[in-house]
Amino acid sequence: MLPADPAVARIGGLTPFSSCDWPGKLCAVVFIAGCPWRCGYCHNPHLLQRRNGETRWPEILRWLQSRVGLLDGVVFSGGEPLQEPALPALLEQTRALGFATGLHTGGAYPQRLQRVLPFLDWVGLDIKTDFGAYPALTSLSRSGEQAEAALLCLLQNNINFECRSSIHPHWHSEAQLTALARRLAALGVAHYHWQRLRPPPSAALPPAPAGWPAPELVEKIAPLFQRFSYREH
């Protein structure tokens, strides 16, 4: 099979500068269009379909050349960037400019994740909930198995990564959050991050109440990990 042409990659957008998408790095974020999952609280619904945005990859590559020495790295996000056949080529071309490369993924394609690991310096893996509860969120029956396989892939390949969970009381009781954190810690996850989910209007859900999750819960979870953080925004 011929490698996919990076010039026709489905680019959904570009954030020129970010200090929060890769811990400790100043980076650009390239958004890839397309995702197989249909989470009801998705904040990027415009990236669910495999279609181009206003910017194409050759333009982004030329822009990145002007950022050499000014940015630490480039994160590929989505959508689900592993759905893009040209992702290995995008990563190779980015690294050839001297940038570190990162990936945001939900883990929908663990075999593709395995193939691109040689081109990555860091991965942010979205852990939505307990793996057995994934189908209720994603509308796909095997999504939890895929996410778990992606996590095991990262653990077995000694790559720098962080697990992230967007949390909301409608989907996560404090007991469920505790159980999920303990399971991840038992598997060997060292870096874990919570972010309070702010549902978009289409989700028809109220925001999480003030004081949730309880500070005592955050304090209880933090010692399970080498690095743990929680952000409300």
Image (cartoon, rainbow, N blue to C red):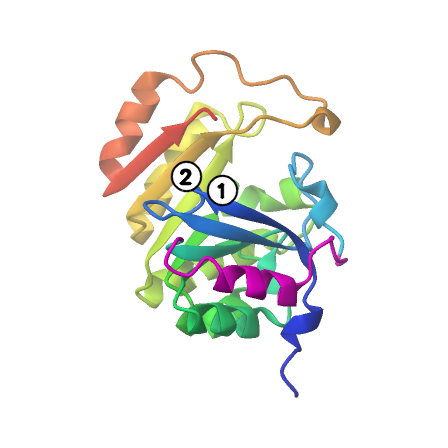
From what the image shows, is residue 193 above or below residue 12?
above
Q: Amino acid at mark 1?
A: Asp
Looking at the image, which residue is at 25% across and 38% down?
224
- Above/below status of 84 relative to 147: below
So how many labels did they put on this image? 2
Q: Residue furthest bottom?
A: 1
- Is residue 90 among what the camera can see? yes
**Left or right: 1 as drawn, with respect to 93:** right
Q: Position of residue 68 (x, y in %)?
A: 42, 61
Q: Answer with the quarter of the image where residue 35 lies.
A: bottom right
Residue 157: which disc?
Answer: none
Q: Nearer the viewer, residue 197 or 137?
A: 197
Residues under numbered marks 2 and 1 in contact, where contact means CB atoms less than 8 Å apart = yes
Q: Which residues are magenta?
A: 50-70
Task: Say whether residue 124 is magenta.
Answer: no
Residue drawn where x is 63% and y is 73% of the image: 6
Compare marks 2 and 1 and give the one earlier in the sequence: 1
Residue nearest the observer in this picture, 184 or 168: 168
Q: Is 63 inside the magenta-drawn segment?
A: yes
Structural crowding at the residue carrying mark 2, measured as other residues with C-alpha within 10 Å and reported as few (<14), some (14–19) or many (≥20): some
